[in-house]
Amino acid sequence: MAGDSSNLDAAIESLLNVEKQMRLAGDVAGTRKAVIDIVELCYKAGAWKTLNDQIVLLSKRRGQVKQAITAMVQKAMEYIDLTPDMDTRIELIKTLSSVSAGKIYVEIERARLIKRLAKIKEEQGKIDEAADLMQEVAVETFGSMAKTEKIAFILEQVRLCLDRQDFVRAQILSRRISTRVFDADPSKEKKKPKEGDSIVQDAPAEIPSLLELKRIYYELMIRYYSHNNDYLEICRCYKAIYDIPAIKEDPAKWIPILRKICWYLVLAPHDPMQSSLLNATLEDKNLSEIPNFRNEYENEKLLGGALGAKTEEDLKLRIIEHNILVVSKYYSRITLKRIADLLCLSLQEAEKHLSDMVNSKSLIAKIDRPMGVVRFRTAQDSNGVLNSWATNLEKLLDLVEKSCHQIHKETMIHKAVLKA
């Protein structure tokens, strides 16, 4: 072993001299080759500690060329999966990560190293450490990284934040992805780089396609909105997944998603967006493919567990709100007692629900509490308000004109009487 170690040290020393000569001579290709030879020599000898030491040493040599450091990092990354044990693998990743830190020309390699290290930490059950590692990297600023790889990296950051129940940071990270990017046509985006632009690298083979990333993004957003019970946003996320061509082509995939769209639409509070989505869903021809969808509240999986009790309360509330809206369309004036009877509620509950709907601006009504009477009004758009104002002004001007005419008439009669 001692002989092998001395032979390795001698070979490394010889290559270091060659690397120095090439570097000082400004020979980029020669320096690059010498650096790669040193890395390969350490790997073939199985000297992993020596490999880490040489990587750090070579990166700190005076006047080291960028191409040599890039080649060294990329070559050493090939050996990560070939390490004999997990500790050696982690040490090599950490070494490469520290060497590439702060160097723009190896920023993509560092991001990939951090992602691998975070994956190892997650497998060890250290979710917090994995999330903290991933948040160190801001891939949205990397000009040469492929768009799909950027999105996949940010989605991994969001997922780890959700796993650690850090919903605020998950929302902040998710905003780094514009949803418009999922609707872009990849075939039309391939343009020749302009002079001075960085060349965009191809994404690794394991990175999902853009449509698959779209599905992952909305599934993560469903997890986030489920935390706040934001039913309308959850519905919109399922609608986006439903519109993916690969989902729409397979009934086994779109049927459960369409069921969830319907459920969350029913659970969402009434507002213009909810009405628009409701009408769009009702026009969907696929809705006829699930005729046995009614009366399946208890069987729907999304209503199980901890969400079940809250969802049941919200469903009852939506039914009450719907019934009040129906009453408001048929009555302009009705007693509070009659509303309570129609809704099967007490007077206090009926008044509370009416007040809540008025406060949320989903209903226009006034309650005369001493008389116990509710007056409903229909909402007017801007054109309706302007037309009513114009009509009132016209009536006012007519009255003014008639008044002036009567005053003039009386004045003339009075003058005639005085002359006589």
Image: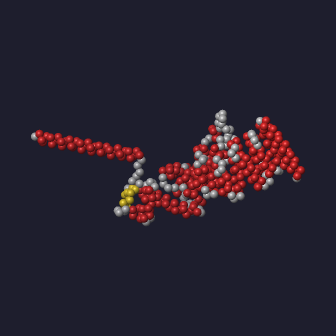
Q: Is residue 203 visible?
A: no
Name above or below for residue 15 compared with residue 339. Answer: above
Residue 163 x/y as whole percent: 64, 57
Q: Is residue 361 visible?
A: yes
Q: Quadrant of the C terminus?
A: top left
Q: Nearer the viewer, residue 47 or 194?
A: 47
Q: Nearer the viewer, residue 138 or 207?
A: 138
The residue shown at (71%, 52%) is 117
Q: Outermost residue toward the top?
A: 195
Name above or below for residue 413 compared with residue 159. Answer: above
Q: Is residue 223 found left or right of 102 in the rendered image?
A: left
Q: Is residue 217 found left or right of 391 in the rendered image?
A: right
Residue 138 x/y as whole percent: 64, 47
Q: Nearer the viewer, residue 67 or 57?
A: 57
The residue shown at (82%, 50%) is 47
Q: Outermost residue toward the bottom?
A: 346
Residue 95 x/y as whole percent: 74, 50
Q: Is residue 150 found left or right of 372 in the rendered image?
A: right
Q: Outermost residue toward the right?
A: 3
Name above or below for residue 370 compared with residue 210. Answer: below
Residue 139 x/y as whole percent: 65, 46
The residue shown at (83%, 50%) is 46
The residue shown at (37%, 44%) is 387
Q: Quadrant of residue 86?
A: bottom right
